[in-house]
Image (cartoon, rainbow, N blue to C red):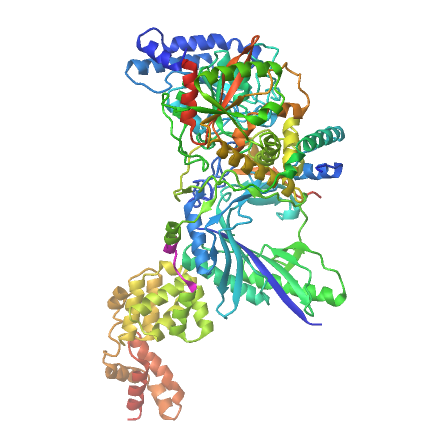
Amino acid sequence: MAYKFVAGLEIHVQLKTKSKMFCSCPTEGPDTPNSRVCPICLGHPGTLPVINKEAVLMTLALGKAMNARINRVSKFHRKNYFYPDLPKGYQITQYDVPLIEDGVFVMITGKKVPIRRIHLEEDAAKSVHIGSSGRLTGSQQILLDFNRSGIPLAEIVTEPVFESPEEVAMFVEELQATLRYLGISDAMMENGQLRCDVNVSVEVDGKEGTRVEIKNMNSTKAIRQALSFEYERHVRAYEAGVQLQVETRTFDEQSGETKAMRRKETSEDYRYFPEPDLLELHVTDELMEEANKYNGSFHEAYKDALTWLGREKEARALALNKEQFSVFKALVTKGGDIKYVSRAVLIELPNMLSEEGKSWDQLNESHLSSIIDLLTQGKITMAVARELLWQTVRGNDPLEYARSHGLLNAGATDLEAVVADVLAKNPDVVEKYKKGNTNVLSFLVGQVMKQTKGTAKPDAVREVLIKRLSE
Amino acid sequence: MFQVSRAMLQHLALLAQIELSPEKEENLLEDLNHILKTFETISRVPEPPKWFSLGNTPLREDKPILEALSSLIPADRSEQGYVVVRRTLEE
Amino acid sequence: MKIGDIFERRQRGELTFQSIMELTLNNLEKDELLHAFLYKRPPEELMKEAQQADALWDQGIRKPLQGIPVAIKDNICVEGLPCTCGSKILENYVAPYDATVVKKLKEAGAIIVGKTNLDEFAMGSSTENSAFGPTRNPLDTNLVPGGSSGGSAAAVAAGMSLLALGSDTGGSVRQPAAFTGIVGFKPSYGAISRYGLVAFASSLDQIGIFAANTMDALLGAFVLFGKDPMDSTSTEIPIGPEPSQHNVRRIGVIKELSSLGLQPDVERVYTQFLNTLAKQYELVEVSIPHWEEALAAYYFVAPAEASANLARYDGVRYGSTVEANTYWQSVRMARSLFGDEVKRRILLGTFALSAGYKDAMYDKAQALRQWLIYEFNEAFRTVDIIVSPTTPNLPFPIGAVSDPVEMYKCDLFTIPANLAYLPAISVPAGFTGNLPVGAQFIAPRMQDYKLLSFAASLEVR
């Protein structure tokens, strides 16, 4: 039998507004539970919602980035259900007329992912389950933090066009990057800024399979694992002739498996109806224009990266990391040689930053740029450059450091004198060389480099050494 | 044409999270069906000639404001600042 | 005494705000029997505020409602005061913020006397559905004052406040005004901010004003009107502190009303009232074909919205809590504190929205609402204002109406204005014996000023 993986996504993205969707409570601040709440986001009697303009602009920008249709008149509805994290007993969301419809996201592979809709809604409170095992099943109580209640969410719904777990993961990575370049969300899965529910089924010989929804994947790695597990589970069931359940499953990171979730006690009938506390949302030309302020583009970044790096995989990797890309771009724009910039930004700095526990945006671009300049002009060697990069990462001024440590002016020191000195100090090694053990040459090169503090060019050192040794 | 059965009433009560004793159920069935019968004329309403709109919803500037309101979370129902509720999953 | 007269006499030194408050406090003794208030502020506080109002006046400070005692329906939030909505579920709830109308009243110098009784969550037409006992009609204490804002109506009718706020979703200000012989004004939808009014049916709810006369109601409207950034459905509607030229010439009399079963006493007084009107205005018959079905539309739209609006009462964040093993049990037990009428409407509304029924109920009700709007628009092409009785019946004895549908029919004349977003006012039309009959005037949307100016001109005459 032929099996084919099929998946569609529903992605909730927390928008990076300063205040909440329907009230003015701050979205950022101390993590003290329930410190950013007001009668509105706690669902007190008599309170009313007012739409945050910025959330609308950000969603419009996303719609534009996906070449979608923007509904100039859209509506908000109430989605009715009871749950402890839902203060009003209904969620304000969009239903029959969402803000955005019919878009397309073009992946780096060239695959076109149709976007069915993007709508605006409000987040629920955050629940912390406590109990004997600290796990959901043993919980006696739920602790609620309403700081998250009312954070604006854009819900993105794709058509079911994904053909492998890897493809889903890659889409999510590229979507994250898109949101970050636009500047409308930090889209970190680890802290719930981006939450991805996947509807998975496995076609058997072209026949539609049982659809299962997978939740609670907190990274793209988890997506890969969960969906691969689920694919294999379906295939095994079909092979064994076992009936699959239409259900919602949750991913357990520790076991790497998906597990069926308990059914909610209430039956699901959300009784959507138009939210009477809001009027129609009209997208004026002015709003369309204003949304253009969110204009950063992952795809543009990728194009640049491809021009610099030539290879698609490397270019995608660089473009996915907005901060790294931005450092790369700044250095190239200032005239840095691609070869040196690549070495510094793609190889050296990532390790240094992770070792120092620092991030890209903490780097001083003009310092980096001066190091690249020195390299490009041949004034320092790669070894010195590494040392200076370390200094930059640690927050020191690399030029200052280079000057005070005499690291500049590569090749300008009197190589002949140093070589003579090294040879004089190591008569036994010289002896070995002369007996034909040319391997010791690299030791001598190292000694010269050490004495010149790395400012000498290794090729030049080698050349002088060979000349003197053959005399 | 509008008729609420006992099963339907129980379904509605579950959706609305309202507990009904058997005799309450009886009374409500009677009341609701009486009300529904009175108002069943609604089902014959034809499509109106136009739809009126109250217009364009206002949009708020994205300015965070944190009002210092005392006792929004009563002490007797909170723990370390969290609101405490009983679990949702029934064993 | 009109509020304007109070200010004039204050100016002449013939009275003080303290003397007005003393009078109010005297009248408040009647509340022992009437039970118009669920919460009364301590007399010392009230006298102190009256004293401050006098002191400010003496300093030359003039505010539109300076020193005027007002009563607030107990479904409107006043910071620091209880807001029970007449329900066990909010029995111990203290509002953490001021409704926009309350802010405006305070800024205008009004003195809030207390919170008035109502049918639970404003669902009812008699104020008998309060979890804390009924209010009695000051004109005859065996009778209901109407509802749901019966407490506010009784407060003004008995001189326990000079103005009172109510909420009018299907007639809850106009009908009790008619039953207690005072003026009750429901503005155009959006004229007064609903922020801080505990929602019953959001697309129909509108805060309304009770007053002894139209001039006072107009002054109240002048203070309360205005677009509020906290209420997306509010809008700027012109109003002034005093009546203006109203230019009303043709008054529409609704053709369909003849078939709607007016009580004979009501019909007699109403006919006399029309005859008086006819001396000065041209009465023209107009047709609102869907008037009677409006009641049906209302009883699907209002409960549907209510079923969602009342879902927040789960006992989790505020309100009465019940200890239980699971969240679901505790929610159900907390919600069993709702009274029968509230449960009835929540279930009816849940039904009207539920899968498989929404098309036939909620959606059809919206269609009917659109018909009404259309038909009123057509009618207002030929007339300036429309008149009707406020209620089909006279105030009835407490406990006399037990059939919910009979109770719903009390609002037969008031509901259309809510459904069509129109301003409407009930004014005293006359008496039969000691019982008042109210007449209702309805104006085109946003023409609240014209409506009030017209009604005020009738009183001058």
Q: Residue furthest top?
A: C14
The spot of residue A198 in percent (x, y) is 59, 58
Would you place residue A375 above or below residue C81 in this image? Answer: below
Res A3 → quadrant: bottom right
Residue in front for this viewpoint, C78 or A100? A100
Quarter residue C295 falls in: top right
The stretch in magenta equals A291-298
Q: Along the horizontal axis of the image, is A246 left or right of C91?
A: right
- Residue C38 inside the magenta-drawn segment: no
Quadrant position of the C terminus of chain C in the picture: top left
Rendering coords of residue A201 (x, y %): 65, 62
Whether residue C111 is visible to the viewer of this picture, yes or no, is: no
Q: Position of residue A44 (x, y in %)?
A: 52, 33
Q: Indicate whether residue A297 is drawn in magenta.
A: yes
Q: Toward the viewer: C260 or A359?
A: C260
Residue in view at x 65 percent, y 41 percent: C360
Q: Left or right: C57 with respect to C115?
A: left
Give the left or right position of residue A384, taking residue A150 as reference: left
What is the number of callouts on the image? 0
Which residue is at 40% across, 90% downward?
A437
Q: From the viewer's side, name the closer residue of C196 and A104.
A: A104
- Point out the image quarter for the N terminus of chain C: top left
Is residue A243 in view from this perspective? yes
The one nearer the camera, A461 or B15, is B15
